[in-house]
Amino acid sequence: MDSNSAGIDNSSSAKPTTSPRRRQPHQPQQQQPPTEAATSSSIRSAASSNTSTQSATLLRLQQETDRVKQRLTQQQLENRARAQQQQQQQPPPTNYLIIEPTESAHYEDPVPANQMSSHLKSKHEAFKARLIDDVLGTRADDKVPMEKVVMLIWQFRDDPQVVKFMTKFVAKYAGSRHVFEGIEFYLPQLAHMIIHLEVEWDDAILERFALVIGQQSLHFALQLNWILQGAIEDYQPELPNGEENPNYNPLFYSRCIKLLTNLERCVVYKRPRSQELQRLYEKGKITKAEFQTLEQADRRFAALQITQLDDEDGDQFGGTLLYKRSLRTSCLKAKRWKQRYFCVEERMLNCYNKASGPDRRMIRSMPLEGAQVQPEPDSKYENMFSVVNRSFQFRMRASSPEDMKKWITILNDEATSATIFGRRNDNNNGNNNAASDNQLIQDMTPAQRARYEFFRDERDFIRRITDIAEELRFKERDERKKLAPRLLNELTIPPCVYVPLCGSTDTWRRAMAAFHKDTRVFNTKERCPVIMYFLASRGERNMGTNLDVAEYMHKQFDLFDDDGEGKIIEEEGNDDDDNNGDAGMAPSSNGIVANTNDNAKNGGTSERGDDEGSSVWHENGEQTNDDGGDGSSGNRRLQGFLKDSWTSIPRKLASRIEGNNRRPSVLDNATDLQIIPILEGEREHDDEASVGGSSIVSHNKILMGTDQDRGHIDQDSLNRAKQIVSHGESWAEKSFRMLGESAKSHQQINQAQYEVVSLMSKSNDDLRQEVFVMQMIHYYKSVFAKAKLPLWLKTYRILSTSGSTGLIEVLVDATSIDGLKKSDGYPEVGGMRQYFVETYDGPNSKSFKEAQQNFMRSLAAYSLVSYLLGLKDRHNGNIMIDTKGHLIFIDFGFAMGMAPGHEFSMERAPFKFTDEYVEVMGGENSDCYKEFQRLFVEGFLQARANSQIALGLVEIMMYKSNYPCFSGWRYGNGVALRKFEQRLMLDVPDAQVPKLAKALITRAKGHSGTKLYDSFQQWSNGYAI
């Protein structure tokens, strides 16, 4: 059984070692021999018995033990001598802890700090010095390497002072698009650390950092909101089926709920003084650097205030009820009435065994957002009402009609509107609580209320979209296709929502209406994915057609308050430099007076004659001090703060970092951590209508989308491919048709630009592992691009909105290999090679050569990524092909070596590489095949050279992870990480890597396991071969 197969032998274990030399990937683990005392005791015990067979057996055991000990001793001496020789030639590989697999396989940490060897410590210190210099030594605003920042936070996760400094450092430069794109790219790792770290910290450092960044972009806040929703489901006390949750963790559960509430509070009451700062900058009263510094300080101050509210909140509303609980998705099997104490806390309905006491414990919990609360007057029981959401259904009985009315009022209020600052104790009158909440909303400024309603409407919009997929899942297959268009037509779209399959720096597109007639349903055994299309607009209100998401939300929700007064004043007589440090966390009363006054809607003309102050982004050079121009005198207190060096670690932190107060990680032996610029979507910088693959409406004219990346493939070839791949209608033609239909029924604005956006809604499917795998694919795509290798990978957006729902970006002008082979125009003989010949005008045409190159480059890239990331379940339903010949891999439910059937998996090949693929490239002797081999080897070398970031990402995400690929005795406790390291061949000398990489191709080609798995999928699911 090779090291790349899903069958992993976990019968042996090894103890941690302090030697810097790592065990070779293919060297079997050896059991520790019994001690001499144990052996002697066994022999005496055997001698006391009269069984000669047992005595002979034990004697042989002693002899074998002596031989093993001698062999191990000799081997250790040889290894030590060999290691000393290699230390001067190449850096030693990483040392991992080999842990005995257990049932609760949550990955903790590789090596205890007190077990690190002196050599490992010295290597770590050298790497740490370079890392700190690379991250903190930078002065260019848009060059902060977020990959190194994330790794540095992970390295020193036990030291809150270091983490606090790093988060403040990143928050300072978050106004750069480049830095913010990095923050969003590494959001899965940051969120994972926020949820699972800081267990013993008094200061919620990472939580406050998230709140600061959430004020920068509402889109970031929404993305974090959905990650927290999934974590709440992971650690809730009870599963939807009524069983006790084995992963229930009160600490993580309460932390996620509090952060979720604080996030919404911070979004609504964000930057209470930012508009006054904006006006002062526009009038030239403060410099650009002062404005940005105060803005950052204001965000941190708001985050500090929000997190301190948890300690000030009073008791929550609660009382004793009789209840029945039943599954919404079951036959509502009757259960006995039970008396329990219910409490409304942080938009959750929590059930406890008693109201108070040391043995009080939570039994179950239900999210109230979007829940339906209604009385049941027809029930045979008095004062009965129910609370129902997607997963839970509580039936409850109150003690009186008044008590029932009070509970229904409170729960309905929680389900339909967010309680911004928690609920005070008021067990006597639920109407007072509702009135208080309504008054709180009425007291909001227009900008606060707009943010509150947008944050609520966007989450409701996405939840209703995923609810459609969930509702269709329980319908008959024939009924699904008829019901889906009607459900989408009945969908109410709020006035300002969008499809969040994008980043904060991507173009804003507001969802206006649904094209319900074009809804497409996929029928599977367990799920019902639904493809939906929406009419979207951009450029409304003269904001520009290429305004990005964060910029649009800033202009839409942050600049329209006009009540309240306040000003920033300078205390000329108070120039106390000792207070300069306080400006970093909380502005003092001497420097800032609270205000909510915004006059942007009155024109907001700037005395500077520019519009820079209204932007949420501060690009190159804007973070530096302004030495001249308007407002150069500025505020002396601020100028003193600005002189503080942000590019060097404070003395106390430097001494702390130099120590060993940290937990080692996979990065300890990293000798070089390369900066990998993450490829992001292209941003247009002008206001002209941009036409790509999708058609648009601009100035009341429909413009057909054009394919600008088709290379040497002629239009006739693309038309032939379209007939088979896209069923005769390309995405440009389809969007053109839908826009034409919408023009008849929707009033359009001259200044706006319209287009079609699409998504796939999924339920009963946890997409979080797929989000992580796509992140890794995106990382390797960036690695290949930096090395200028023409390896082609398609990255697309995946959004997990809970533990069982999510959205996926639709791949246009593409179909699965299964769908291709079942199409009417697919050749009956000759396979994919003949398809390429007939579609792209013969083997000697430029179109064929281009399509063949596209196929080869994508095949090389996905073959390499499949091997490195251990992607399995590669049947022809999970591999797509587009009209230009590119292969695209989808569905990453089985990754990091995890495979269907586990140790009995048929997929034993390093990656899927069929004889049919070789035929498309022209055979093993063709130039195309040789180029495939070259790109595979070159890509492998680049992936190996940039392995430390990839290993670090895996290590962070497997820490206390619930991902299937990191859980259980097969893949947990660091097994997946060690297998990943072995696939990277970090133990192999550089000169031998190309030969071994080519050997992977030879072993994968026409592998019997690949053929067997394709045949099995054809027999079980009907996928074409």
Image: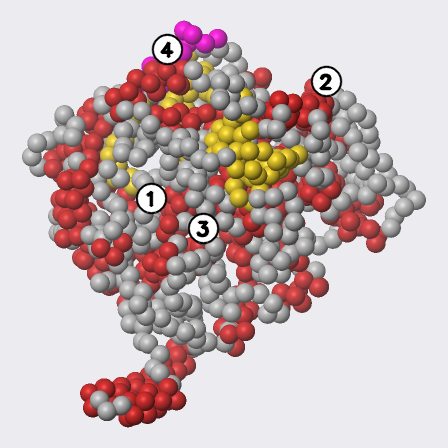
- For residue 892, the mark is 1
Within 10 Å of disc 2 (Cα), the crowding (few <14, some 14-19, many 20+) is few
- Image: 170 above or below 382: below
Looking at the image, is mark 3 or mark 2 nearer the viewer?
Answer: 3
The secondary element bearing badge 2 is classed as helix
- For residue 602, the mark is 2
The residue tagged 3 is: 246
Mark 1 and mark 2 in contact? Answer it, CB < 8 Å: no
Within 10 Å of disc 3 (Cα), the crowding (few <14, some 14-19, many 20+) is few
Identify which amino acid the numbered label 1 is placed on. Phe
The secondary element bearing badge 4 is classed as helix
Looking at the image, is mark 4 or mark 2 nearer the viewer?
Answer: 4
In the picture, residue 41 is in which quadrant? bottom left
Return the disc, 1 or 4, that comes first in the chain's sequence.
4
Instruction: Report x, y in % for residue 627.
Output: 75, 43
Q: Residue furthest top?
A: 744
